[in-house]
Amino acid sequence: MYSDYIRIMMQNRKLLNIELGRVSAQEYKELPESGIVVVLDNVRSAHNVGSAFRTADSFKADKVWLCGICAVPPSAEIHKSALGAEDSVAWEHVDDTIKAVRMLKEQGYKIVSIEQTVNSVMLDGFKPEKGEKYALVFGNEVSGVRQDVVDASDFSLEVPQFGTKHSLNVSVTVGVILWHFRLFA
């Protein structure tokens, strides 16, 4: 009986970090591009910014665009939740989100606001097109993606929700959206 317990526990043991086969920050930078960038539109919490970096690293986003009031590295608060991902994922700060959107459009990205709009596409009914480049815009914790940025977007995606709240934390939304895009990559 005890030996069965040990056998089951060994089959389900947690992997050690060394067993995960993770790449170094330098190796990450040398990986092929995914065609996905994250744009943070005036995200005020440095912890949310750090979480976005960590999630962008996990799903191999090519870059994080920090716009407006977003905190920028180096920052102890960003580092606390990014755990060093701010060193592996390329990033750039732009003073105005609409400026970043225009630059990304010129580079051939489809601009996707992650926002609840009159014509938003539900995430569970959306499949990214292979070979397309996507700039995923995530908004401020209180006011969401700015209306002029929504207007400049190619379309809006909405995460279906079933409870009483009408929104998710921006860091959670980044995870849901990036997972979905990588699922269909």
Image: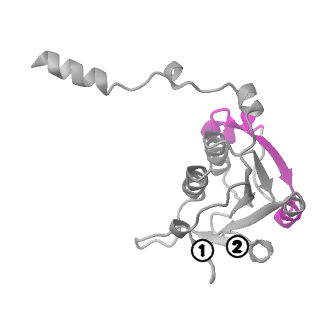
Q: Residue at x 56, y 24 (%)?
A: 21
On the rendered structure, is 166 left or right of 59? Answer: left
Residue 143 visible in the picture: no
Q: Residue furthest left?
A: 1
Give the magenta range: 74-102
Magenta span contains residue 93: yes
Q: Residues within 10 Å of mark 2 (few under 14, many from 20)?
A: some
Q: Residue at x 34, y 24 (%)?
A: 13
x, y (%) of residue 25? 71, 28
Q: Amino acid at mark 1?
A: Val
Q: Nearer the viewer, residue 116 or 1?
A: 1
Q: Residue at x 81, y 59 (%)?
A: 68
Residue 76, above or below 151 = above
Q: Residues within 10 Å of mark 1 (few under 14, many from 20)?
A: some
On the rendered structure, is 120 left or right of 12? Answer: right
Tell me the tag on residue 58. none
- Element assignment for label 1: strand
Magenta span contains residue 29: no
Q: Which residue is mark 2?
A: 155
CA gap between label 1 and label 2 equals 8 Å
Q: Amino acid at mark 2?
A: Phe
Q: Nearer the viewer, residue 53 or 20?
A: 20
Q: Quadrant of residue 60?
A: top right
Q: Which residue is mark 1?
A: 121
Residue 159 visible in the picture: yes
Which scheme is used to colour this image of the protein?
one colour
x, y (%) of residue 149? 78, 71
Circles 1 and 2, Cβ within 8 Å, touching? The answer is yes
Residue 56, above or below 157 = above
Residue 89, above or below 133 = above
Q: Residue at x 55, y 59 (%)?
A: 169
